Amino acid sequence: MRRALEVEPPFDNYVFIEKDAKKCRELEAISADFPNRNVKIINGDANGALLKWCRNLDPQNERAAVFLDPFGASVKWEVIAALGRTRAVDLWVLFPYSAINRMLVRNRRPPKAWADRRTSVFGTREWESRFYSTKAFRSLLDSQRVESVRKSADHRAITDFFVERLRKEFVAVGNPYPMHNSNGSLLFLLFFAAANEHSAKTGLKIANDIIGKLDSY
């Protein structure tokens, strides 16, 4: 938050959404250090708050940069789709690759709760056919039909599928930036997506330049 408020020239308005009340108070304390910034802090679930924010946005006269840093797989696809439909948002989103991948059971279909969560994240059940392969055969003992299910998707397939989903809602999508932990495990993928067709080319160039600089660190 502090870094965002320190940017010069500043944005006209800042909106920070945090579900935890204690963290909201911490954000309010930080914002007090920037009396010249127009800051609004919302204590609530980001999914509902962003849907309401999208409905109130005036796309003819307003533009916005939105940063989504989800807790696990908590951001619903309907929110990302709503941001794209504004045609006025540049979106940066941390895709929770590790959380999604952990819920992809290897040798059977995932539990319903996990499957529903992934459907919420991707906005479609198409992930099932993209991430799993199914083979049917007859049992030698009783001639019953047996179905074998296994996970077939690697990190590239999962990444490509999310890119495809973003491209259905946004004019342009940048190259993803992988973020690993100290052990080299992939945790997140940072994506940029532009919703406004007039500024998409410029926004994409700037985003790819930023991601290129991250690679050099």
Image (cartoon, helix red, strand yellow):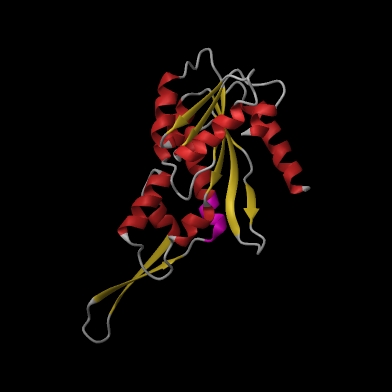
Is residue 93 located in the magenta-colored stretch of the structure? Answer: no
Image x and y of residue 17, in percent: 49, 33
Q: Quadrant of residue 214?
A: top right
Q: Is residue 156 visible?
A: yes
Q: Nearer the viewer, residue 193 or 152?
A: 193
Residue drawn at 64 percent across, 52 percent down: 179
- Lateral position of residue 213 relative to residue 184, left or right: right
The residue lying furthest to the bottom in this view is: 141
Image x and y of residue 113, in percent: 32, 56
Q: Quadrant of residue 82?
A: top left
Q: Is residue 193 above or below residue 159?
A: above
Image x and y of residue 135, in percent: 36, 69
The range drawn in magenta is 154-159
Q: Nearer the viewer, residue 63 or 42?
A: 42
Is residue 157 located in the magenta-colored stretch of the structure? Answer: yes
Residue drawn at 47 percent across, 33 percent down: 169
Q: Is residue 31 above or below residue 102?
A: above
